[in-house]
Image (cartoon, rainbow, N blue to C red):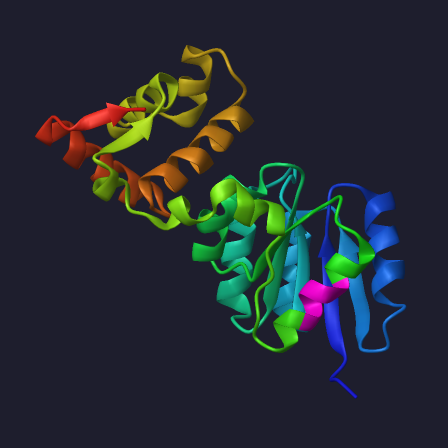
């Protein structure tokens, strides 16, 4: 019999979390230690319990999932973290895996897909939806420099210009009349396009391109 994996669920919808808990606990080798809608509380639970698996909702209110993921992996490096997404999993794949995620799964995934992914992780195997592969996952791993340009939209380039200038995210959001959360979403996409995982790396690569006068826009 497999080792019983202890699971923490960090999600935005209590009803959905409860449904997931019931599904997992139908398996003899899975037990749910706890559920929370708070990223901060989720990090605390991981630090205290060191679970084998965390199911982490990409959309949380108190922190970005990237920040939570990094904190969890620092506190418990052997914990597998699977990020649950709505419909933007493919663009986020490289960014989240680079931060330590063991997998991404749609919130609309079937029970079989969820259990199959967990079974794969036990064997050191990552699973991806076939549709993601068909959409062209491979270009995400290519360096933007090898493609001859950063391929940023005008809005993304403007945001990077302001960040390089030291402008705060809140002020940038006000300037382009979007929410602060939208800036976070833009940054996730920018990081993927630049092939970086931190703000400092993004600034360095963007500054390098602008100094060299190389192509920025898609």
Furthest residue toward bottom = 1
Residue 52 appears in the figure: no
The quadrant in which residue 4 appears is bottom right
Residue 108: horizontal and vertical position, in percent? 76, 44
Q: Residue at x 52, y 58 (%)?
A: 71
Furthest residue toward left = 212
Q: Residue at x 79, y 41 (%)?
A: 13
Identify the image quadrant of the C terminus.
Answer: top left
Furthest residue toward front = 134
Which residues fall within the magenta stretch?
A: 115-119
Q: Is residue 95 above or below residue 183?
A: below
The quadrant in which residue 168 appears is top left
Q: Is residue 93 above or below residue 218?
A: below
Residue 71 appears in the figure: yes
Q: Determine the main secondary structure of the stretch shown in magenta.
A: helix
- 215 horizontally vs 22: left or right: left
- 61 horizontally vs 149: left or right: right
The mark total stands at 0
Question: Magenta span has 117?
Answer: yes
Question: Magenta span has 85?
Answer: no
Q: Residue at x 22, y 43 (%)?
A: 146
Q: Nearer the viewer, residue 77 or 39?
A: 77
Q: Residue at x 87, y 44 (%)?
A: 15
Q: Nearer the viewer, residue 168 or 203?
A: 203
Q: Is residue 124 above or below residue 135?
A: below
Identify the image quadrant of the N terminus.
Answer: bottom right
Q: Nearer the viewer, residue 61 or 122?
A: 122
Residue 175: horizontal and vertical position, in percent? 41, 11
Residue 49: horizontal and vertical position, in percent? 68, 72
Residue 177: horizontal and vertical position, in percent? 49, 11
């Amino acid at each position: 019999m497999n080792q019983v994996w202890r699971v923490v669920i960090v999600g935005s919808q209590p009803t959905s979390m409860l449904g997931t808990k019931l599904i997992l606990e139908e398996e003899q080798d899975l037990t749910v230690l706890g559920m929370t809608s708070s990223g901060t509380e989720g990090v605390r639970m991981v630090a205290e319990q060191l679970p084998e698996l965390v199911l982490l909702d990409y959309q949380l209110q108190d922190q970005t999932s990237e920040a939570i993921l990094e904190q969890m992996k620092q506190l418990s490096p052997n914990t597998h973290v699977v990020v649950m997404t709505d419909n933007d999993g493919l663009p986020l794949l490289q960014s989240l895996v680079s931060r330590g995620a063991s997998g991404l799964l749609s919130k609309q995934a079937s029970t079989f897909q969820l259990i199959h992914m967990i079974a794969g992780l036990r064997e050191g195997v990552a699973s991806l939806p076939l549709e993601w592969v068909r959409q062209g996952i491979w270009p995400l791993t290519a360096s933007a420099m090898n493609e001859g340009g950063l391929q940023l939209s005008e809005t993304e380039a403007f945001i990077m210009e302001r960040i390089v200038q030291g402008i705060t995210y809140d002020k940038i959001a006000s300037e382009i009349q979007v929410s602060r959360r939208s800036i976070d979403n833009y940054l996730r996409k920018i990081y993927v396009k630049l092939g970086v995982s931190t703000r400092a790396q993004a600034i360095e690569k963007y500054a390098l391109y602008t100094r060299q006068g190389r192509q920025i826009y898609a």
